[in-house]
Amino acid sequence: MAADRRYNIAKDLISAGKITSFHRIFEIVPKSVVYKDMGINYNRFTKLMANPDLFTLRELSTIAKLIGVDPKTIIDLAYDTLKPKKKG
């Protein structure tokens, strides 16, 4: 089965610095495509999206592989969602 073309779009946007948040990836590649390609069920993926700190490194690496970027890139995007917002 051929990979969804939207992964390439996400890769290009990440490489160009236009995707700067983890959740933005899923505006390009639908969550339904990603969780099916990862081989996990909808309920688990929904829980992970609500709490990105629950993703394992292996799961984040799988997302990176699907997109075609370095795993650290996806790990960093996911980590950035955990940083507390500055008051101001």
Image (cartoon, rainbow, N blue to C red):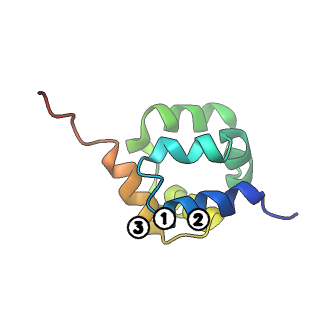
Q: Which residue is depicted at the point 30% across and 42% down? A: 82
Residue mark closest to the camera, 3 vs 2 = 2
List the residue tagged with mark 1.
16
User: Which is nearer the eye, 42 or 22?
Assistant: 22
Q: Sequence order check: which comes first, mark 3 or mark 2?
A: 2
Q: Mark 3 points at which residue?
A: 72
Q: Which of marks 1 and 3 is nearer the N terminus?
A: 1
Disc 2 crowd, CA 10 A, few/some/many (<14, 14-19, 20+): some
Image quadrant assignment for residue 32:
top right
Comparing 6 with 61, the one in front is: 6
Q: Residue at horizontal 43%, vertical 41%? A: 52
Position of 50 with respect to 39 (left or right) is left
Dot in front, 1 or 3: 1
- Give the CA separation, mark 1 to mark 2: 6 Å
Q: Which residue does the numbered mark 2 point to in the structure image? A: 12
- In the image: residue 88, left or right of residue 80: left
Up/down of 19 relative to 85, above or below:
below
Amino acid type, label 2: Asp
Few, some or many C-alpha atoms within 10 Å of disc 1 (few <14, some 14-19, many ≥20)? few
Q: Is residue 60 left or right of residue 42?
A: left
Residue 13, relative to residue 85: is it above or below? below
From the top left corner, tell me how far across and down residue 68 is, in percent: 61, 70
Q: In which quarter of the image is the N terminus?
A: bottom right
